[in-house]
Image: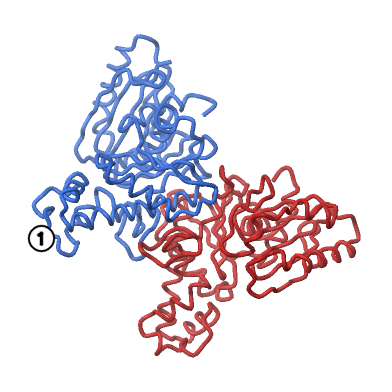
Chain colours: A red, B blue
Amino acid sequence: MLFLALDLGGSHATCALVSGSSLVCSRHLPFGSTARFEPVLPEITHTLQELVAQAADPVEGIGVGFCGLVDAANNRVHSTNGKFEDGLTFDFPRWARESFDLPLRLENDARLALRGEMFAGAARGVSDLVMFTLGTGIGGVAAMAGRPLTGIHGQAGVLAGHVPVRAKGRPCTCGGRGCAEAEASGWALPSICREWPGFSSSALAGRELNFKSLFSAAAEGDPIATAIRDHCLEIWGMMAVAAVHAFDPELVLFGGGAMGAADQILPALQTYVDQNAWTPWGKVRVAPAALGSDAALLGVPTLFREDW
Amino acid sequence: MLFLALDLGGSHATCALVSGSSLVCSRHLPFGSTARFEPVLPEITHTLQELVAQAADPVEGIGVGFCGLVDAANNRVHSTNGKFEDGLTFDFPRWARESFDLPLRLENDARLALRGEMFAGAARGVSDLVMFTLGTGIGGVAAMAGRPLTGIHGQAGVLAGHVPVRAKGRPCTCGGRGCAEAEASGWALPSICREWPGFSSSALAGRELNFKSLFSAAAEGDPIATAIRDHCLEIWGMMAVAAVHAFDPELVLFGGGAMGAADQILPALQTYVDQNAWTPWGKVRVAPAALGSDAALLGVPTLFREDW
């Protein structure tokens, strides 16, 4: 069974052809920082049509991961926070019918990535887990009893990166304050660094501020970078404990761009969870996600299976 | 249908006879601070036997709410945090059989109270909600799709008071740090007050330190009491937002001893949730629990219904 897969990430789109649990081919389309979806739609449609034309077998449907809150039952976008805002009014099923003559399923991108890890990645055979994606934002999604959690308004279990971890904390893109995402994500990192006491004397001062430069400077022993890194690890640890207490998982996966420094991240988070989560039944396992940026694409086949 | 109900709260037990959604009669047994269950068991057993003897109709079963993590499927206690520690090894079903010749169901006390509010209280007709009990500790429980959340190890949705809200925060009874319970519960309040800058000049300085004296001094305009009250309200607001983001409820109930000051608590929490929770579908309602300390007792009939 072949499916078209589209991952809409705000500043990029990835188009792919998926067969079973593997990618037949994929194309990454970078857009820079656009807040609107329709200007880039012709390029996306064209790319997907080329993939269909290349397909050796008939394509059965198209699955779309969208960077916002999604009403999956009705294939509509519920809310964005500044990314692809016109997705709110866009008729995705009609577009799929008219452009490809295919049925469409829409899902939140983080939840779709969780489906991918459960179907084809690091969470195969695990029924209860939480997955965090440490990137520009922080995705945090939960599955219970073998299925991604949805909730009555479709937003349960997808906002684990928006758990408040600091009173009167930094304003978040979601409208709240002191969310884990506002206190330790890629978009917040430059401000966090510049406001850190002693920043100007740090090796970070002359560099581009992102997780790569942060973990690299910390590994070189820079004390300011080390302190900021440990701050981020603590916030991620709190966020993981909050999710363990909420969803009772066996496994917490971490993925995303920051995981280039997995050797600095995973042992610290395993220790934090061991020391702070109340799990009398045993130990929650902390592990890396396996599929990287392909996770959402590889979750698409599950959108068309009745047993998912 | 008549049921025996037993609410085991650590420093007390309440025994009752329940018919449908009302209490026929109840007896409160205060124990002071005992960490063990078996020394007070004879008094509990005797009281329950008296209730059975009074019953006009046959009693169908006994439901027990226990102040710890419970494996409800096997009627066993999973973990306590210092309250009735010998509950861990106690054979509840055998005790019920030998003492009353009745079947027994064991449940976490907070989750049982949630069942009570759903069956007979403020959450009738609501399928997705969270309930917090602001007392000596902070109980926080969730229901989704009409049923209390359980999870693979039985601890999902019952630890919403143990969400971490402060990095490097106060040590909590659960083993973690900076939990909402450690930062704004009845047991933590005396230390929080005494360590507050300027406490010795506050009207609170000469009083017993509890939520009653705190809210009363705040209502009288004492600035230190007002600041500590606002700190508690903010922690409870963060905890409510964390639960809204996790479980996607329509309703957040607050109960417990602190709710004597509901007029100071509920409007503040409704405002906090309105301003900080990301709920594009609409507004989460914040409301008082209705059943007070009877909630767990009134949840007992649901333990014996197959549709619960």
> Could you say where residue B52 lies in the image, as x and y percent from the top left?
32, 15
- Looking at this rendering, what residue extends furthest in the left direction? B206
**Up-down relation of residue A177 to residue B189 (above or below):** below
Pointer 1 chain:
B
The image shows a total of numbered marks equal to 1
Give percent across and percent down for residue A275.
40, 61
Q: Nearer the viewer, residue B172 or A182?
A: A182
Foreground residue among B192 and A43: A43
Query: A198 above or below B79?
Result: below
Residue at the disc numbered 1: B201
Above or below, comparing residue A15 to residue B303 in the picture:
below
| Left or right of residue B201, residue B307 in this image | right
- From the viewer's perspective, tell me whether residue A81 is left or right of residue B121: right
Q: Whole-percent x and y of residue A200?
A: 40, 88
Crowding at mark 1 (Cα within 10 Å: few <14, some 14-19, many 20+): few
Q: Quadrant of residue B65?
A: top left
Q: Depth check: A102 or B44 in front?
A: A102
Q: Secondary structure at mark 1?
A: helix
Q: Is residue B26 left or right of residue A58?
A: left
Residue at 41 percent across and 51 percent down: it is B273
Query: Residue at the location (33% across, 55% down)?
Result: B234
User: In the image shown, does A174 or A200 lie closer to the viewer?
Assistant: A174
Residue A34 drawn at (x, y percent): 65, 71
Circle 1: residue type = Ser
